[in-house]
Amino acid sequence: MIKEVEGIVSIALQEDIRNGDITTQAVFSGNERTSGNFLAKESGIIAGIELAGYIFTTIDPDITFKQLIKDGGKVSRGDLIAEVSGPSDSILTGERTVLNFMQRMSGVATKTRVFADAISHTNTKLLDTRKTLPGHRYLDKWAVRLGGGKNHRYCLDDMYLVKENHIKVAGGVKEAIQKCIEHKQLNGNEWKIEVEVTNMDELKDAISTESIDMVLLDNMDINMLVEAVEMVAGAVETEASGNMTLDRIPKVAETGVDYISVGALTHSVKASDISLLFD
């Protein structure tokens, strides 16, 4: 497992276990062995199963975890997701942490699949944002991929994204882009440059520089998006964002934008209902 995930899991286990599971210590002798099943209590997309196995073996290598459904797979209410067996006390100690991760990741993946399906009749791709649970970004973005979406930038240092406040400080769209170009040349990096625009004048300024890779069409209505896509004419990639509800997103995709970013994929998530039941 990669370091980002190892760190998240370590903090989660320390947070939950601290000095030990005193209820389990009181009830069990430490010699009992148990088997059980993870059960989907509602339909959706499952995510976090690979992570669950890692968490259990981190707690106790004697725990056996068997996936019955792959990450990213569809489940219906009552479906078995995975089997677990081993020392009863170790399984109970890790139960809540495992479920917390699986339920959130499955919630993100399920919501992503719903939005991705809504635009599947077009060539537009669904993107996430940085509106993730603090400290859990890698897992949130992993779940988005499992749900059928694509990841936008992971953090602030993997591409230039010029937004409204950058433009105000720089003194204009062209000025902000020029500063990014100079910074890029100074540091010798190959990061892409994306510029957020809110109207046609800003869009004209952005694409006239011929030095950007992508424009973010922010909070534009359908007519403006159509006009913007025509104006860009494939010169750079286009991304639409703002007020992306499930009802609206198909109409936005039909304008011909390359990408639609949806913050709600990760910032407004209902955890999926999953249980661990002992045999």
Image (cartoon, grey):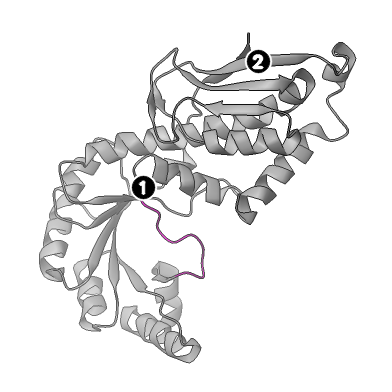
Q: Main secondary structure of the magenta part?
A: loop
Q: Are marks 1 and 2 in contact (CB under 8 Å)?
A: no
Q: Which labelled disc corresponds to residue 32?
A: none
Circle 1 residue: 262
Q: Quadrant of residue 21?
A: top right
Viewer-side label of 1, 2: 2
Position of the C terminus by quadrant:
top right
Residue 103 spot, x, y in % from top left: 54, 29
Residue plotted at (28% across, 82% down)? 211
Bounds of the magenta segment: 150-158
Residue 223 in sight from this viewpoint: yes
Q: Spatial distance from mark 1 to mark 2, Cα to Cα?
A: 40 Å
Residue 246 spot, x, y in % from top left: 28, 36
Q: Which labelled disc corresponds to residue 35?
A: 2
Residue closest to the eye, 44 or 258: 44
Residue plotted at (40% across, 35% down)? 72
Residue 158 spot, x, y in % from top left: 47, 69
Residue 269 in sight from this viewpoint: no
Q: How many marks?
A: 2
Residue plotted at (44% across, 74% down)? 166
